[in-house]
Amino acid sequence: MKRSKTSFAVFVLPAFVIYTIFMLLPLISSLGLSLFSWTGYGEKEFVGLSNFSRLFTENPFNVRFFNSLFNNMKFFIYTIILQNVAALVIALLLNKELTGSKFFRTVYFIPTTISVVIVGFLWTLIYNPLWGPLNYVLKSVGLEFLAKPWLGDPKFALLSIAVANAWQYVGIPMMLFLAGLQSISQDIYEASDIDGVSSWQKFFYITLPLISPVIFIITTLTFVGNFSAFEIIYAMEGTLAGPNYSTDILGTFFYRTSFGQRAGAPPDMGLGAAIASCMFAIIGLGVILWFNLYGKRENY
Amino acid sequence: MRITKVKYKDALIQALLFIYLIFTVYPVFLMVITALKTNAEIIKHPLSMPIKLNFSGFIKIFTTQNFALYFRNSFFVTVLSILITVFVSILLSYALARYKMKYVNPLSIYFLAGMMIPIRLGVLYINELLNTLNLIDSLIGLILVYTAMTIPFSMFIFMGFIKMVPVELDESAYIDGCSERKILFRIIAPLIKPAVATVTIYNFVPIWNDVYFPLIFIHSPEKKTLLLAVTIFFGQFQTDWSLVFSALTVATIPVLTIYLVGSKYFIRGLTSGALKG
Amino acid sequence: MKKILACMLIGILLLTLFAGCGGGKSFGTEDKEPAKAEQSTQNEETKNADQDTGKPVELAMTSWRTEDAEGWAKINEAFNKQYPNIKVKFNPVKNTEYDSYLQAALTSGKAEEIIMVRSFDAGKRLYDGGYLVELNEAVIPNLKDMPASTKMPFSTEDGKIYAAPEGLVYLGFLYNKKIFESNNLNKPETWDEFFKACEVLKSKGIIPIAQGAKDSWTLEELLSGPIIMPFVGGEEWKQKLIKGETDFLDAGFVKHLEVINKLKDYFPEGYEGIGYTDQQQMFISEQAAIYPSGSFETFYLKKMNPDLDFGCFATPVQNKGDKRWLNANVSFGYGINKNCKNMDAANTYVNWLVSAEGAQMLGDTVVGFYSRHPEVRGVADEQASEWLTYLSPQSDNVMITWTYQYLKKQQPDVGTLTSEAVSKMWIGDYTPQQAAQHIQDGMKWFFDSIKK
């Protein structure tokens, strides 16, 4: 089949133009702010690489940066397990097409349609140590020792937020996995039945490889999305990403720095842009690495 | 013997799905009862059922001055943004998924790059750009920004789905004399309806609920979007939760509608039967 | 089942889509209708106004105080009665996005004529960026009545004023009168009395203090701000601090941290996970007796629970008879946009706002916010008035929250450091002395900057 460069260009061009003009160019040029000292008004003062040196060597900025990077990795792992692995399990169960499956599928998707503001409010309520239903249930079934001030405990706050986040978005990977699962021809399973292959073997040797494009997409999107997330944490823990910065991830650190916080220091757009540049580098490198690792095998 | 074992297993699966259903539904249920309570009740008894159904939040929303106008602005912006995104992203993803060119990988990363930089950092530059293009205070400007913003995610979803469609399908159609355009729109597009539905819903929610860009780019009262008009109820110290919940519950209605209408496409498009053909 | 649901939803959708608009019009023309209608009524008004007095002018003021939209409508109406040819609109923007909004609107020249300006450095950068005009008694004569201490939060270091000072809130403690009465408790005057009252409440199973650790700004503004005053000696200490004559290892400063540390014994269980909204909730639902907060809550508390019988008291003192300080947080002033096309009208409006009449009107309509205009000694709302009873006759016992002036010029700012120090103290990582050291170390940039 003939695939020419010209027709490739025709397909790519419309998206390329809109995206480049209205998204990428403004974003890339804003990274240039990292070389300036600027509060957002008036003259920008050129300061060279000093924002970067502050970020990496000056307390508290370096502490916050590495702390948020580490938290971000945790948040990513939590999300992979709570959202994506859970979505795969649910998709596998739904794929049996038992009575009610369609109904379940529809309902599981509903949280995706709710605004983050509401999700934040609801889950803060659920985790409330005094009247929250979670602690209430734990206490009433005799698991009192498990009751915690969830969002106020540095050990559990990030996990609690990851649960809320996964609750909201599990529907998307679930849908993608389901679509992937349903695209697998039943003939393959029937053939393997004859060969006497166990269910686990079927899952690992047939299902997983066949839905690997979906796994690739979902992991990439989760990675990129998680490393720039901030809204849900703002909604549940505020700008300082408490307790004691235990829920501070790169996105919240960036927003706090470049847009200021409630009655705090004026925004430091230069330092903020320096953080954004680092985020860009980290995510970019991660994606390139991931494309090479996974993409090669998958012929991406 | 075997049949009962299978049934036992099915029941277990259904039980698991049901438990997850409760986990999903409880917060949604909380949302709905909260929207139906008065502010005082929300504060005093955050978890209880409303003593008396209170629709005043909804009434206040629907009788907001110019509600219909704001609703239409929001609808216009959201729907058009999504239509454009879906269209250009399908074209793009088709090229990226099907053409074996050396640009494919760098281009996918190029498009992903937009998701790696927080968009609010660029907002001043976008503001400047729209100002020079005379698109400040214009719904078209808003649409272009939203479209640009949603292309990366949409591209990725479409790419994954197009890759799941066997290449042999294109090739046999090509041999039958189909043009590429026809292959894309007649053969591939119908098969990736679930992806279209996913992209639509995933993008609909944040665009519909967004207040940040309208707040910055829109100045005329007659161009406000619905949610921008509603932000007046978020206070510095006191938020009118009854109204916020009503507004945001109302805001989920269009999304849910689209979802329920589209949900039959969610799965069926990609069945093995269709692909075998 | 799903089909029925879908049909219902589509129905609702269509209903909402067409709610409020008459039939028969085509979609396209309808879009412009309300704007046109507004315009034509405006034109009529314009004509009428034209006949009475000079040129009619329309001004707009932007603000982050969305809660006050109704109050401002009243204030502007009162203004319009006296100046029929100037009409002012109040355009509030969601608080958290206000700064971004202003930044974009000012740079693209679309910002309102009158701009509500935040106090200290947050507002000063608008002036430094060249977006506000300088105000003085020549253009705003009524500025002369305003005490110098209220102009300071809106002045440059060389004394130029860029916003007319107005809204401030008083901070201290709110208490539930019913709970206090039924336990035979009185408003505490000293810290000993305060903690005794807390003991009594705790022994009765009532949550003594509605406070949590989750929203860090409350630690700085609602706790440290008021509590520090009796231990360091109020405003004078702050003036010494910003000159570098004292620092955070000062005995009085450490003492205030000790008191904050002691408070936590009277917080609810799981206070680590309690945030600002929960604090409000505990006080409104009468589960907690004392709520460290401020006058700005008055209207909301009454609206949420009309049966709530509450009062306020200013920060307790160390020994009976000590000077009682009252903590104020300066919230907003009025700035004028450099691009304003009707300077005269804008000046007239701002001048009226800071007149005795405008100041009184603010205190009466925007409940819990006050002007420091010397003639305002009471306001319409009973609870909001109670705060003013703590003002000394010369109004010389007001301390503006200590964290703001010069101490928040850059990160790490003193407010963030204080919140960090307090929460680490509460979980037992720091002693009060170490907490003070944490603030001292973090503020090295400040002490370095005044040495130069």
Image (tube, rainbow, N blue to C red):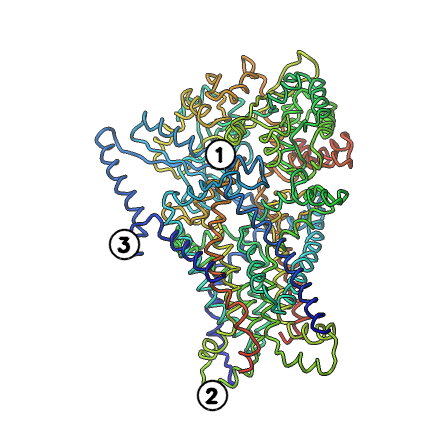
Q: Tag 3's secondary structure?
A: loop
- Closer to us: C292 or C436: C292
Residue hosting label 2: B176
Q: Quadrant of residue C111?
A: top left
Q: Position of residue C40 (x, y in %)?
A: 25, 42
Q: Which residue lies at the image location 62% right of the left edge and 65% below the top edge?
A: A218
- Closer to us: C22 or B84: C22
Q: Which residue lies at the image location 49% right of the left edge and 85% below the top edge?
A: B174
- Tell me, for residue C117, which label it has, or none: 1
Q: Which residue lies at the image location 70% right of the left edge and 70% below the top edge?
A: B4
**Up-down: is B121 above or below C418?**
below
**Mark closer to the chain start, 3 or 1:** 3
Q: Tag 1's secondary structure?
A: strand
Residue hosting label 3: C25
Residue A109 seen by the camera: yes
Q: Give the Cα separation between the discs numbered 3 and 1.
A: 44 Å
